[in-house]
Image: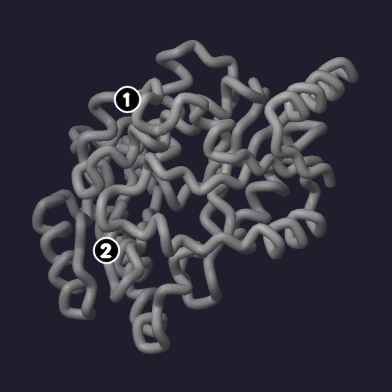
Amino acid sequence: MQIIQAKDELREQLREWRNADEHIALVPTMGNLHSGHASLVELARQHAERVIVSVYVNPTQFGEGEDFDEYPRTLERDTRRLKTVSADALFVPADDVIYPFGHDSATIVSVPGLTENFCGATRPGHFDGVTTVVARLFAMMQPDVAVFGQKDYQQQLVIRYMCQDLGLPIAIVTADTVRDDDGLAKSSRNQYLDDEQRRVAPRLYETLREAAESLRSGGRDYEAMEARAIRTLEAAGFDVDYFAIRRAEDLAVPDRDGDDLVVLAAATLGRARLIDNVLLTV
């Protein structure tokens, strides 16, 4: 596996692959890789002959008071993990590679509408940081495919809309959420949980599944179901950012049967902000 830091070296490697008529898949990450990330790489391999993983802790998607300085940076361990899966290259850019004019003078890519609710409401500016850094990675690499996880459901939807709006010829593939045996979604931030919080944390997924089962059974009082779920999570010790039942295609309030729905939630437990979701058709 090749480790690349410089933009020129990246371009040369990409040119070599394209000259060989090989398709390229990108897996963008912030590092601290776990088995969920490994599943993204494995899925990417199903869609392209070459897979490149980026590791970059992007400062512009962290808000004031968030955990940018504390976010785990584990490049040596990440490199070992990627060598055991099917990644062809690891791109580890410095700040000035991603933001050559600095963060404050950077061109911003913003997706209105979809970014204004849920994680966008509780983390102002977060999605502008995400779309800006992803757009830069896309511009540098021009991959055929990019793979994201379903756990960050709103994020992958925002990126899909960005690509469609900008006419980017990149297929966005969403990978199923990888979970521990008790249902907790794999996340780099799970390590912030202490033993007692780790015991409680799977309740988030359980509550999402309970809401999904109510929907499958004919429940349609969305506001009442959301309020009940929030009370359940708060009683378990969560500080709930949101719990919502929405149309999967655009996060609008469901208004007709037959829609694909997503039940999505974000809640803080101790120092860990956990997000998760369940998809279903009713």
Residue 134 coordinates in the image, percent (x, y): 50, 31
Residue at the spot 77% in from the left edge and 24% down from the top edge: 14
* Tally of numbered discs: 2
Q: For numbered disc 1, what is the local secondary structure?
A: loop
Towards the viewer: 213 or 128: 128
Please give the residue where the numbered disc 1 appears in the rendered image.
111
Q: Is residue 243 above or below residue 16?
A: below
> Closer to the camera, 21 or 244?
21
Three-letter code for the amino acid on which mark 1 is drawn: Val
Residue 249 seen:
no
Q: Is residue 40 above or below residue 48?
A: below
* Spot occupied by residue 193 in the image (x, y as percentages of width and height): 40, 77
Residue under numbered circle 2: 267
The x, y position of residue 42, in whole percent, is 72, 48
**159 with respect to 6 (left or right):** left
Q: Is residue 64 left or right of residue 190?
A: left
**Nearer to me, 211 or 130:** 130
Q: Quadrant of the C terminus?
A: top left
Q: Residues within 10 Å of mark 1 (few under 14, many from 20)?
A: some
The image quarter containing residue 227 is bottom left
Of labels 2 and 1, earlier in sequence is 1
Residue sitting at x 77%, y 44%: 3
Visible residue check, residue 21? yes
> Left of 162 or right of it: where is 78?
right
Marks 2/1: CA–CA distance: 24 Å
**Extreme-top residue of the structure:** 167
Q: How is the image coloured?
A: one colour
Q: Quadrant of residue 217?
A: bottom left
Q: Quadrant of residue 65?
A: bottom left
The residue lying furthest to the bottom in this view is 196
Question: Which class describes the residues within 10 Å of circle 2: few (<14), some (14-19), or many (20+)?
Answer: many
Numbered tag placed on residue 49 in the rendering:
none
